[in-house]
Image (cartoon, rainbow, N blue to C red):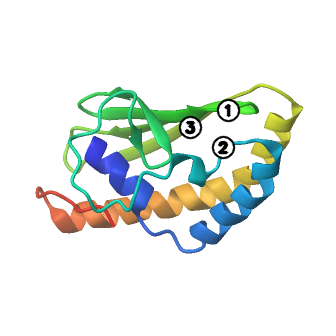
Amino acid sequence: MTEIAALATTVDVPGAQPLMQLRDLIVKPMGLKTADDFHDGDGTSEKPEPQVGERIGFFKIYSIGENEIILGEDDTHQDFRVSVFRTQEAPSRLYLATCCQRHNAFGYLYLATILPFHKLIVKGMLDGVAKKLAAAGDGPVAAA
């Protein structure tokens, strides 16, 4: 599941990178966490399998199971969790669900602003992951 989560955080979704850069530019002066807060080097070094409490990309790992991984982040405006779930039957299906606990009015405004973009990015990300997993068959999949 960590491999799938890593793939999901690195798959290229057209238009997502400029949107994330714009988001970071807007929220940084407000004291919210940005991608720069979680930069972990050049990404080329081999790392052991990530564990609970470590990070996959921007996301902290909260739980790792055989068929589900829970990622997320806590911030001043909201806490969020992302569940990536894989079914066992063939052909397997991949599901992604997010849950947000907003802490203040800014959390509500933030979520209302990003939600349309979030839905498009998540759909593109799941499509990209599904294509890479299908192409790999039962073999390992290299993160993009």
Q: Residues within 10 Å of mark 1 (few under 14, many from 20)?
A: few
Residue 93 seen anywhere in this rendered image of the structure = no
Q: Are marks 1 and 2 in contact (CB under 8 Å)?
A: yes
Whether residue 67 is situated above or below residue 125 in the rendered picture: above
Answer with mark 3 or mark 2, whichever residue precedes in sequence: 2
- Horizontal relation, residue 78 to residue 98: left or right: right
Q: Which residue in the protein does label 1 denote?
A: 75
In the rendered structure, find residue 98 and report the number of the disc placed on it: 3
Residue at the far front in the pictured view:
41
Q: Residue at x 64, y 54 (%)?
A: 118
Quarter of the image where the C terminus is located: bottom left
> For the residue labelled by badge 1, is the local secondary structure a helix, a strand or a loop?
loop
Q: Amino acid at mark 1?
A: Asp
> For the residue labelled by badge 2, is the local secondary structure a helix, a strand or a loop?
loop
Q: Amino acid at mark 2?
A: Lys
Q: Are marks 3 and 1 in contact (CB under 8 Å)?
A: no
Instruction: Quote the CA–CA distance across marks 3 and 1.
Output: 15 Å
Q: Which residue in the protein does label 2 denote?
A: 33
